[in-house]
């Protein structure tokens, strides 16, 4: 049986990459909703419809488990998805808890998409964890667009980050959360623009560890080599190089 990984586009590949490292014997189906990316700037109800279509696809494929490798989709649909489908579903939300712990009384900046930043799920999480009110939220939709267009040149990306972060006194910050899987591709660019004591935190490894723990009870066949298939809004992608070039990036 296979494991589904879902994102609006190529951001979830940063999760897939960790999953393949930790669970090399598994068969993964990666679904990029290329017809509807980006999710984060669209109306919530419209995006919920896209997410259910995608998960119907995984249900038809008979997946054993699904990782929603998208903070935006998790923030608006995870509870309803778990009600509808019988297979286990792992979601992702911005890693605010480790960030607050690591920031050590300094401020925390959570970066995500406009939907994630607006949604109650993130606000509730912040209220629970942030008694000192040191957490700020910022939407960076432009970074999703850059990643989808495979734009990683330092000049363009760093200028975008400097513009977006210009309103923040970064010296006050102890941690920055990459609360969108697309942003993880830009870790090196963030290192360039943030003061070096700022921790950069994402939830990818934690998510993959949760997947492993979920599968633990049925055991792992370590002699087996797993497989990888890519789907664009439900259609099998024949030209896998589109995706594989992202998996080869270092960040
Ligand atoms: N990769 C997504 C996330 O983690 C969403 C990006 C988008 O489609 O706006 O939130």
Image (cartoon, rainbow, N blue to C red):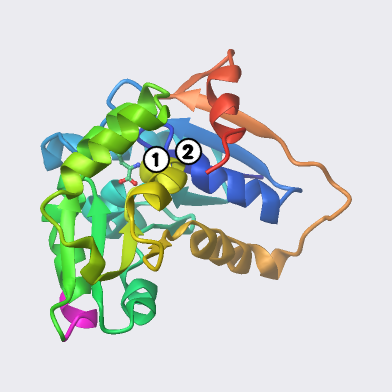
Q: Residue at x 42, y 27 (%)?
A: 153
- Residue assigned mark 1: 55
Residue nearer the viewer, 116 or 82: 116
Residue nearer the viewer, 124 or 165: 165
Q: Is residue 121 above or below residue 14?
A: below
Residue at disc 1, secondary structure = helix
Q: Is residue 120 above or below residue 241?
A: below
Q: Is residue 44 magenta?
A: no
Residue nearer the viewer, 190 or 240: 190
Residue 75's spot in the image, x, y percent?
A: 24, 55
Q: Main secondary structure of the magenta part?
A: helix
Residue 90's spot in the image, x, y percent?
A: 44, 58
Q: Which residues are magenta?
A: 127-131
Tell which residue pokes out farthest to the right in this image: 223
Please report contact status of discs 2 and 1: CB closer than 8 Å, yes or no. yes
Q: Residues within 10 Å of mark 1 (few under 14, many from 20)?
A: many
Residue 4's spot in the image, x, y percent?
A: 52, 43
> Where on the picture, by quarter, is residue 113?
top left
Q: Is residue 39 in sight in this rendering?
A: no
Instruction: Estimate the spatial distance between the alpha carbons at disc 2 and disc 1, rounded to whole Å.
Output: 5 Å
Task: Answer left or right for 72 relative to 127.
Answer: right
Residue 108's spot in the image, x, y percent?
A: 25, 69
- Residue assigned mark 2: 58
The N terminus: image quadrant: top right
């Amino acid at each position: 049986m296979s494991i589904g990984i879902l994102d609006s586009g190529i951001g979830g590949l940063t999760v897939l990459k960790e999953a393949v490292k930790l669970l090399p014997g598994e068969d993964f189906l990666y679904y990029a909703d290329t017809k509807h990316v980006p999710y984060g700037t669209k109306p919530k109800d419209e995006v919920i419809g896209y997410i259910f279509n995608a998960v119907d696809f995984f249900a038809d494929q008979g997946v054993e488990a699904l990782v929603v490798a998208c903070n935006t989709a998790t923030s608006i649909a995870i509870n309803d998805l778990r009600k509808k489908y019988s297979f286990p579903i792992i979601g992702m939300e911005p890693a605010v808890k480790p960030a607050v712990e690591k920031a050590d009384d300094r401020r925390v900046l959570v970066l995500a998409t406009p939907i994630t930043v607006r949604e109650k799920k993130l606000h509730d999480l912040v209220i629970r964890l942030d008694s000192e009110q040191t957490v700020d939220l910022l939407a960076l939709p432009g970074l999703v667009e850059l990643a989808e267009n495979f734009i990683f040149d330092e000049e363009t990306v760093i200028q975008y980050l400097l513009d977006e972060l210009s309103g923040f006194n970064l010296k006050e910050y102890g941690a920055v959360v990459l609360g969108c899987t697309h942003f993880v591709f830009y870790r090196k660019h963030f290192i360039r623009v943030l003061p070096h004591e700022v921790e950069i935190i994402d939830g990818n490894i934690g998510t993959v560890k949760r997947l492993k723990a979920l599968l633990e009870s049925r055991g792992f066949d370590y002699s087996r080599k797993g497989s990888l298939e890519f789907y664009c809004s439900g259609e099998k992608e024949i030209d896998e190089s589109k995706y594989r070039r992202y998996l080869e990036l270092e960040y």
